């Protein structure tokens, strides 16, 4: 199952430098606040922060206690004279004034510092002034834009970008996108050309250009070629399709967060959950991450046999050979055995859940929608899915997929399905339908429109040459959607892809790919192997159908 890589494939840039830059700036900001200090860290920032600087690093720079800030009052029992606060802008940081006012009421006068990440907005200081504590605190900015999750995946960890921009019309993160592009430009050399599709892409490009013109120009060797920026709404079908590669299924079922997944006791065969880092350093995971789920069990079985063979060869060893085996091989074999056990347990757990959900019938319905046939049967399946109250998000996903592939629902079907959905899952989702309609995810078909969206948008970009292997990632989607154009659009130059939840960036080639699920990344890795290219996916946040639709819910926090 291991794939050969062409010898002429270029080496990836060293993106660990991005971590070091973020850590050095964090340490600098901590040292600007001398003395022992408490840190109040916004919950969504905990995982990314742990990838940059762990507790040991923070303790080395006079951090005494750490508090996770959630949607509840901040309570601290510390007697420290200095406090620090790391928070995303405009989320939970409005709780911070309560800390200052509470300390004042008890006669405790301390120094306070709010460090905003990834950037500080004018509205933040405005709110501090309104709360009457502007003179009691100092503010700063931690420019933490890019977090490498793996050798070829970089994330801004801004899952709110999609809803904020496309639904709320909030453009505050566009500057952050431009700053992330500027960081790559500054560290890894100038880009040859920048291309873009969409309004958000244009604004991100303009923001980046402004920063380039304002900054100091340095002569660097270019490690990245051309850049393409493509708005997320160019293709909303792909992220709504079921993922069938191993990494995608792990994300759908267990939720990979910041490159880490928590396997439940059912997987670990113990009484506690275990957090596992999923990246190329995990040799077992690295070999199965891009494979169709149906092929994973065969590989894991063969891997188990090979591992047993490696253990069995101890029986014929003399003392010298045994000493060499223990010092050089045994530790690696034990680590591989532990990882193999976890992935076998995860595969069994996923198989049980997918069998219970009748996964094959679900995939058949999706294929019919993507191919545009047996639509009435698909509607009947969706109605049954809704009436059985199988999963609210899953029912919503199928409704949106039906709407997108048919260029909207017939008015009578729209009214009927909407009424059944609200009756099954609650009237509180009425506003959710408005949100979905605003984004064009679930709409009524307009008179006179007969071509499906899939045909009208990508029907002319047909190339089945590379579609065969892509079926491992998307099944019939590989033949139907934007991936049909990949074979024609890739050249033999250095390629890097920055794939946003909301914007997609592609370096050194014109490649129209939208969305950023693990299945899409898998397809890009395959194309890279075929053509001797290396793709680097940089995203505002890894997404899947559940995350995309949960951000549209009317009760979204």
Image (cartoon, rainbow, N blue to C red):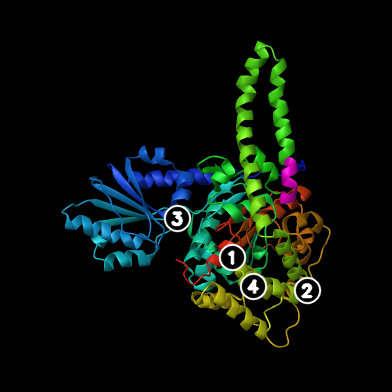
Percent across and percent down for residue 93 are: 35, 60
The residue beneath circle 1 is 391
Gap between marks 2 and 1 measured at Cα: 23 Å
Gap between marks 4 and 3 measured at Cα: 30 Å
Task: Give whichever of discs 4 and 2 has the lower sequence position.
Answer: 2
Gap between marks 3 and 1 measured at Cα: 26 Å
Task: Give whichever of discs 2 and 1 has the lower sequence position.
Answer: 2
The residue beneath circle 4 is 399
Percent across and percent down for residue 500 are: 59, 60
Above or below 408: residue 73: above
- Residue 295 colored magenta? yes
Above or below 432: residue 186: above
Name the one closer to the observer, 508 or 459.
Answer: 459
Gap between marks 4 and 2 measured at Cα: 15 Å
The magenta segment is: 291-299
- Residue 118 colored magenta? no
The residue beneath circle 3 is 44
The residue beneath circle 2 is 374
Describe the element under mark 1 as helix, strand or loop: loop
Nearest to viewer (mark 4 / mark 3): 4
Gap between marks 3 and 2 measured at Cα: 43 Å
For label 3, the crowd category at 10 Å Cα-Cα, with few meaning under 14, some 14 to 19 and many 20 or more, is some
């Amino acid at each position: 199952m291991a794939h050969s890589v062409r010898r002429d494939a270029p080496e990836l840039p060293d993106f660990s430098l991005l971590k070091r830059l973020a850590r050095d700036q964090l340490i600098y900001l901590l040292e600007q606040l001398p003395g022992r200090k408490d840190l109040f860290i916004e919950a969504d920032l905990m995982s990314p922060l742990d990838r940059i600087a762990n507790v040991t690093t923070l303790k080395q720079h006079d951090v005494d206690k750490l508090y996770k800030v959630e949607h509840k009052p901040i309570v601290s029992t510390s007697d420290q004279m200095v406090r620090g606060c790391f928070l995303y802008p405009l989320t939970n940081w409005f709780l911070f004034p309560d800390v200052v006012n509470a300390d004042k009421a008890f006669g405790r006068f301390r120094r306070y510092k709010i460090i905003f990440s990834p950037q500080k907005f004018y509205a933040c200081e405005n709110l501090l002034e309104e709360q009457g504590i502007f003179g009691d605190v100092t503010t700063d900015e931690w420019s933490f834009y890019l977090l490498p999750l793996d050798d070829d995946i970089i994330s801004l960890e801004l899952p709110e970008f999609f809803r904020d921009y496309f639904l709320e019309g909030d453009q505050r993160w566009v500057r952050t996108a431009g700053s992330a592009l500027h960081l790559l430009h500054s560290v890894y050399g100038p880009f040859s050309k920048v291309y873009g599709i969409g309004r958000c892409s244009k604004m991100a490009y303009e923001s980046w250009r402004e920063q380039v013109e304002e900054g100091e120009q340095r002569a660097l060797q270019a490690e990245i070629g051309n850049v393409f920026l493509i708005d997320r709404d160019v293709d909303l079908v792909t992220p709504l399709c079921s993922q069938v590669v191993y990494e995608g299924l792990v994300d759908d079922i267990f939720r990979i967060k910041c490159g880490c997944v928590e396997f439940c006791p059912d997987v670990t065969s113990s009484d506690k959950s275990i957090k596992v880092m999923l990246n190329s350093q995990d040799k077992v995971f690295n070999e199965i991450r891009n494979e169709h789920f149906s092929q994973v069990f065969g590989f894991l079985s063969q891997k188990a046999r090979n591992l047993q063979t490696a253990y069995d060869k101890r029986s014929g060893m003399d003392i010298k050979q045994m000493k060499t085996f223990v010092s050089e091989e045994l530790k690696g074999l034990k680590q591989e055995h532990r990882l193999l056990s976890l992935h076998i347990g995860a595969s069994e757990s996923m198989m049980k859940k997918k069998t219970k959900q009748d996964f094959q019938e679900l995939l058949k319905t999706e294929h019919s929608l993507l191919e545009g046939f047996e639509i009435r049967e698909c509607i009947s399946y969706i109605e049954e899915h809704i009436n059985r109250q199988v999963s609210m998000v899953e029912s919503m996903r199928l409704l949106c997929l039906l709407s997108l592939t048919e260029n909207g629902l017939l008015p009578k079907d729209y009214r009927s399905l909407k009424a059944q959905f609200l009756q099954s899952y609650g009237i509180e989702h009425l506003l959710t339908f408005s949100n979905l309609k605003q984004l064009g995810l679930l709409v009524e078909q307009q008179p006179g429109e007969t071509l499906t969206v899939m045909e009208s948008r990508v029907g002319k970009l047909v190339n089945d040459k590379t579609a065969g292997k892509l079926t491992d990632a998307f099944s019939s989607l590989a033949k139907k959607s934007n991936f049909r154009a990949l074979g024609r659009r890739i050249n033999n130059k250095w390629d890097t892809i920055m794939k946003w939840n909301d914007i997609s960036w592609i370096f050194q080639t014109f490649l129209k790919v939208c969305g950023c699920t693990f299945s899409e990344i898998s397809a890009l890795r395959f194309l890279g192997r075929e053509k001797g290219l290396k793709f680097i996916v940089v995203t505002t946040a890894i997404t899947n159908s559940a995350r995309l639709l949960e951000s549209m819910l009317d009760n979204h926090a």
